[in-house]
Image (cartoon, rainbow, N blue to C red):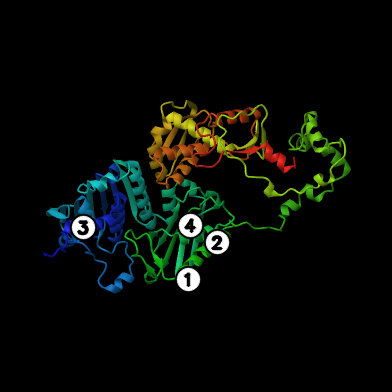
Amino acid sequence: MPDIIHLLPDNIANQIAAGEVIQRPASAVKELLENAVDAGATEIKLIVNDAGKSLIQVIDNGKGMSDTDARMSFERHATSKIQNIEDLFHIKTMGFRGEALASIAAVAQVELKSKRENETVGTCIEIDNSVVRKQEAVAMQQGTSIAMKNLFFNVPARRNFLKSNPSELRHIVDEFIRVAMSFPDIFFSLTSNGQQVFHLERGTLKQRIVQILGNSYNARLVSVQENTDYMNIYGFVGKPETAKKTRGDQYFFVNNRFIKSAYLNHAVMGAFDEMIGRDSFPMYALFIDLDPAQVDINVHPTKQEIKFEDEKIVYAFVQSAVKHSLAQFSITPTLDFELDSSIQNLDAVTKPFTEERKTSVASSSLYNTFSQKHQAHFIENRSELKHWKDFYEPARPQGGSNEGNQQQSLRAQDFSLPDHTVLHHAPFSVSDIAQLHNTYLVVQNDAGFIVIHQQNAHERVLYERFMKALDGKPIATQQSLFPLTIELAPTDVVVLNELLGDLNYLGYHLEPFGKNTFVIQGTPADVDQGSEKTALEKMLEQYKHFSSDLKYSKREKLLRSLAWQQAIKAGKALTQKEMKSLVEELFMCTSPNITPNGKPTYSAFKKTELDKLFGR
């Protein structure tokens, strides 16, 4: 029998390795940007076309490479950063394994140009499917320019699995931000299809955060700075009012390398305990510096998951540092028992409240306004409540009373669970609807009554209305008399550009106006005038919240986001007309019993259960 085990050709072996390192265009962007940083560049430019599918180019002014180094850089495991095994445990550079360029050359057509400072000409290398096609001298400035074209041209199956251009561009922007935030002393720019998305001048960390995440954070950042012999931590956290429904603006860096750590995220969340809602997430950009020997960064191909030698120490240190900063900047709640001296000198405090002054104040219109009309318990026409008085007065006995029945104990288990059967065509009366706690609507039907959650119900109504709009029945747009402009963070601009077509069907008329700005020409009629910007910002935030769920399409995420954002929230008082309209629209829906997310919109209660509860 002949031998059957043999070595794979280099190009096939490189493609297998590329499957770990280069999973999508953003993976190549990360590797190329990190190489530019390691080269000592002070200016790094990223250019992409078709979300990196046709072109990814990184240009830097770093130290460049010689002819031999440029050729060697595309060999597997060729690196300038590892000399012996001990070096693996003291990694301070971004790249180190020597796989990135070899993997990129295996799945793309690559052109590399590089020149060192003291050389008169540089070198240009063209590589196709791991094979060097050409190497020649070229005139250029100091630094390196590497362009990869037609990603996965030789692996069609992998190319077919790539997402839409807007989706892939979002991933590229994420990787760009992570590298750019790590090095605020380096100029970065990102250009997509000829349009500049980011232009980040060199500056401080705070300036870089504001450049990336938007001016809204400018006065809402709290500095974190703690140093010990074991580790240092520095950076910024957002004040509690900046907390959002998504984790998007959360960045951890260890030795300037972006990492993902649910463990450390839990530490920060603990520091914000009781200052933000449980479903909210604070903004933070925190940098941890510690001895590389205390960290293993080679546990994952993307180098975004690492292991600490002592996680508990790092956890406690992070939580303590954030708590200390919030307290130091008076963010945490405090009690002040000192009364300001300027307040103590006011007439209202120093002078006695005489009977004459009391009579004068009681007769004023301001006093009457607060004591009557605007009190929740004040109702002018009390005759309408006569039947409520009868309800609370005990009924007169019409014969012998059953003492035992009156003292019969009622147990919770005697009342069975509410019936959740769909009441799509069930008869009910909407002539008189009661609202409880400004959240629940109570409607009587033949068998008993149903309790409707107003926000859940409205979400279902809006969702089906939006579905019809995208199926060819666009929602009417209310044109703005004075169009507003909305300025967004660059990451949100990418998301909004992806949604503009569908938003137009849903009643939003938006036009790009400058780099990160849009003009709101019109909105749906049910969006209150003056709240257009807030509505769009909340919709984008909710859309990003849904974006982590891969099972939903882009359109489905948009529909759910808009339905949640525009729905009547719990706690809002409704008129009888509004309640009646909501109930009628709910039971005209194809699925009136659940929200788009699967929550119940109502519960049905049988009259027989009420009779049982009261021993009848």
Is residue 511 among the parts visible in the rendering?
no
Q: Which numbered disc flags the more N-terminal residue, 1 or 2?
A: 1
What is the spatial separation of the Cα atoms under label 4 and label 3, in whole angstroms? Answer: 41 Å
Q: Does 50 sit above or below residue 236?
A: above
Contact flag, marks 4 and 1 (Cβ < 8 Å): no
> How far is mark 3 from mark 1, CA to CA?
43 Å
According to the picture, the residue beneath numbered tag 1 turns out to be 228
Residue picked out by circle 4 = 236
Mark 4 → mark 2, Cα distance in angstroms: 12 Å
Locate residue 446 relative to residue 231 in the image: left or right: right
Badge 3 marks a residue whose secondary structure is: helix
- Image quadrant assignment for residue 135: bottom left
Q: Pick the residue in front: 346 or 519.
A: 519
Measured as percent of width and height from the top left, residue 140 is found at 19, 52
Binning the other alpha carbons within 10 Å of mark 1 as few (below 14), some (14 to 19) or many (20 upward) gives few
575 shown above or below 326:
above
Q: Determine contact: label 1, label 2, CB under 8 Å.
A: no
User: Is the N terminus in the top left, top right, bottom left or bottom right quadrant?
Assistant: bottom left
Q: Which residue is mark 2?
A: 323
Vertical comparison of 136 with 1: above or below? above
Is the C-beta separation of discs 4 and 2 under 8 Å?
no
- Which residue is the site of mark 3? 14
x and y percent of residue 292 in the render? 37, 69
Q: Earlier in the sequence, mark 4 or mark 2?
A: 4
- Inspect the image, locate mark 4, and give the three-letter code of the amino acid beneath it: Phe
Give the label, 4 or 2, closer to the camera.
Answer: 2
Residue at 51 percent across and 48 percent down: it is 244
Question: Which callout, 1 or 2, points to the residue nearer the camera?
Answer: 2
Which circle's residue, 2 or 3, is located before the other in the chain?
Answer: 3
Measuring 41% from the left and 49% from the top, which residue is drawn there? Answer: 212
Horizontal side of residue 559 vs 183, given as left or right = right
